[in-house]
Structures are given as structure tokens and as C-alpha cells.
Image (spheres, helix red, strand yellow):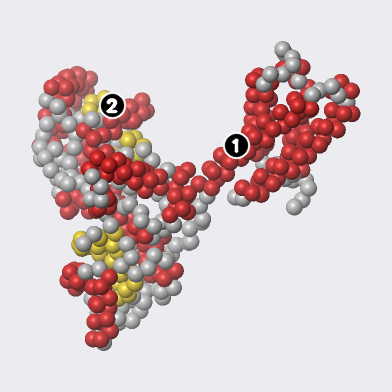
Amino acid sequence: MRVFYKPYWNYVIEDIVALVLSFFVVLEWFPLSTQIPFQKYDVFAAIFSSVWLFSAYFAHRYVRVKYLRIDTAIYRLLAAAALTFAIMLVYMYVIPPHRNYSIWVLLTIWIAMCAWTIVILIISHAYNYATYEEPEPPRKLDRAPQKVLKAPVEREQQQTEAIRRAISMTTSPLLLDFFDEHLDVASSNTFVLRSSEIFNILKLRDYRFDTIINLMPLNQIRGINRMIGMVNDKLPDDGLFVCCYEAQSTTKRNFLNRYTPFFGYIFYAFLYFYKRVFPKIFMTERLYFDITEGKNRVLSKAEVLGRLSYCGFEIVAEQKCRDLNYVVARRSFTPESIQKKRYGIFVQLERVGKNGKKIAVYKIRTMHPYSEYIQAYVYDKYSLQAGGKIKHDIRVSTLGRILRRTFIDELPMVLNLLQGDVKLIGVRPISAHYMSLYSEPLQQQRQRHRPGLMPPFYADLPSTLDEIEASEIKYLNRCEQKGTLLTDFVYFWKISYNLLFKHARSN
């Protein structure tokens, strides 16, 4: 490694912060022999700081690397600290004015500096460790329409029976009826495996099989998106992928059955935090997966279906068999990229604003991860309930339902109000998919007005989609006829009355 190099100034600033903290703590809190320590030791502090930075530079502490091992970083720190201590001892002995400085002053400041530097070093490496990600392999974005390489032929009866027997023993005989309804297990173009190793998918020849079945639950696979994306690359157009998982509700039920209700819910709260929250925090996510190797993950139904949709599949059929949920998905497109999604407490949703402009609406997260990719699927399967919300919406978490009913989830929308994207009273900001359910005239009328925090829904309390449309048309017509300011004033008091006295709530 070269002796002279351009220092990475972020590392230098970290050392300067540690120096300032060290001198402040030592001179302010330690019982020194002077009443004015900052005046007495100011020159000494400046010299010590210069020597420290000089020593750290020549110990290569300021060389920028993408990821530096913690043991290497501590070795360089100790080298810099030893050189600093040696130079300061010589300096105190040679320079007469500072010869009388106590060795304990130097030792105290030196120990404090090393301690603060180690703390900053550990925090810095913890952050780098947590945020370091391996680059994703390039994707085949320009692939032409593909068909399976070989025409399917029926396997020999003995081989087919062996496969069906293996599936039956691994899962349940009832699952074979579900498979027979949606795919052909006897086909030579159907590949069946039970593996958590992505290598077993990677080694398959492209477009050799038109159906891939993996009987290993997704809960046991590290890198779920990567595995699903790899299956997407291996399948021809309209190829089928069958996967399975244990849903969060099943995990919770099985866990609570082991204990009494009181202790069961206490233990489950810790389990939920460890296996559901811990992996979603960016500072602990990688540590969690390195410890558990991605085994026994807790996955919700919405997250699994959302991951499949995000990775280029459309859901064909679902079936629960014993404790596992099975999904048949059809390859529908090649995703531009398959990245690791991060989901925090706050979410930014794309909504249709005035003049059809796309606006980012801020809310507290109430849905499971990847839920945004299955809105159309959930609507087609469950339709709408009274109030215009999706019936039995699997995307909303238990905590999310509480937040919605108390309107806490909409508090961050105050930022949208300050930015001018929405106003206090107005039609609800909705997604492009939800907007497509409205009549064409209402879509056009909606786009002439800014959406609002408090929609006319809470003034009229409609039940069906037609009633919701009628409520919004009534509000928008009144805005255009009598003015927005007066209309919003009247609706504000109607909405406030219904919220306070009729307990109108969001589902």
C-alpha cells in the first residue's frame, strides 16, 4: 500500500469529532490540578490532535475502501495510537515548557481518544455492515418471446407414480388434486424439486421446462426475490411456477397453541418483533439473516403474493394444505430489476392529483410489505365492501386496521397539505387503479380539483361505489357552482359532526 494517498475526509472528520469529545470529557469532568484546564492545555491539545491525525494518516486509517474488516480497522487504530503516544512522550521530554506536564494527563487523554474512536468505529462499521449489499446479477431485459425448447411428452407411468408418491409423502395426497387441476405432473416439461438452494434453479437450462415446482417453503429460503427472479428467467412465456409458504396467521396459531393465552401472547410479541420487525430494520436486517440464514421466516399471504407479482408473475390459483399455502403463478413479464425492498414505518404512495399529476402521498404503513403490487388481484378476488374499501383486504395488518380506524395513519399527510398537493377538504387522493373504477366524466371532473385530507365520504357516509361516486359528484358540483371556499366550510362542519358524534371511521 502506498505511503502517500488522498485521505477520505469523512474518516478525518470522524477522528476530529472523537478528539473534541475526548478533550471535553477529560478537561471538564476529570479532577485535574488546575481550575482553568482549557486555557492551560490548549496548546497541548492542538499538538496532540495534530500528532494523532498525522499518525492516523501514516497508519492508513484514512484510506477509503468499500468495506473494511473490523479487525483491520482496529489494527490500524492501535498502530496510530501507539505512534501518537510515542511521539507525545518524546515531545514532552524535549520541549521544556511542557516537560512538567503530568504523564497521567497524556495517558488519560490518550485512553479517552482511543475509546471514543473505537465507539465511532464500531458504529460506522455496524452501519456499513448493515447497508452493504452484493450487486444483483444483470437481467435479460431484451429477451424475445420464448417457448419451451422441447415439446412435452408424457413420462413413463412408473416415473410419474414415483413423482406423485414423493409429492404425496412430502406434503399431502390432497395436494395432487390441486396440481392435476392446474398443471401436468406427468409432463416431461415439469420439473419438481424441494430445495432452498438457489444453485439448483441456476443450473437449469433456460426454457427447458414450462413448469417449475419447488416444495420447499419460502420461509426457509434466503433471497426469495432472487430465487423467484431466477425462475422467471428460466421459464418460457406463460410458464408456471408453483411455490408454498407457511402464512403468518398459521405461524401465530401454532405458536399460541403451545402456551396458555397470557404467556402465549407475550411470547408471540417477542417472536413477532424478532422475526417480523427485526428483519425489516435496515440496521439489523443483514445481521438477522446472517444469524438465522433466512430460516423459519414469518411471511404474510400478502407479502408472498406481492413478491410474486413484483418478480413478474400473475397469480393463477391458491390452495391451503395442512399448514402450508400453495400458489400457482404464471410468468407474465420480465421485471426491469429485482431489488431488495425496504419497508419502514412511513410509506410514500403514488396518487392522482390535480390535472392528473402524480403526487406522493405520505402515510404511516398499514399494509404488509409488497402489498402495493397486488391491488388489482385483491380487488378482482374480493371486490368492494360497504364504504368502497376492498372486502377482506389481506394486505392490511392487524396494527394497520387500528391505525386506520383512529386516523393515525393519515397524520403524515399534513406534509402534503403544507406542500400544497392536497387541501383540508376534498375528494380522497386515490391510486390510478382505483381511479379507473370511476366513470369517465367523474375522472375528468376529479382532475380539475385538488384532493383533500377530509373527503366528502365522511359527510354523506355512502356504502357502495355508486354512492361514493354520487357523493363526490355532489361535492365537486357544489364547488364549481357555489365556490370552493364556501363549500369546504359547510363540509368541514358536516364531516366533524359525523366523526365526533356518529363515529364515522375508515376500514
- Residue drawn at the location 13% of the way across and 43% of the way down: 385
Label 2: element kind: strand
- Residue drawn at the location 75% of the way across and 25% of the way down: 105
On screen, 36 above or below 458?
Answer: above
Which quadrant is the C terminus positioned in? Answer: top left
Where residue 213 appears, x then y in whole percent? 30, 70
Find residue 423 and name its label. 2
On screen, 35 above or below 338?
Answer: above
Where residue 89 appears, x then y in whole percent? 83, 32
Where residue 354 appears, x then y in whole percent? 29, 34
Q: Judge from the rendering whether residue 271 lies leftward or rightward of residue 94; answer left or right.
A: left
Q: Residues within 10 Å of mark 1 (few under 14, many from 20)?
A: few
Q: Nearer the viewer, residue 98 or 281?
A: 98
Where residue 495 appears, x then y in whole percent? 17, 24
Q: Judge from the rendering whether residue 65 lies leftward or rightward of residue 280; answer left or right.
A: right
* Residue under numbered circle 1: 119
The disc, 2 or 1, on the residue closer to the chain's N-terminal end is 1
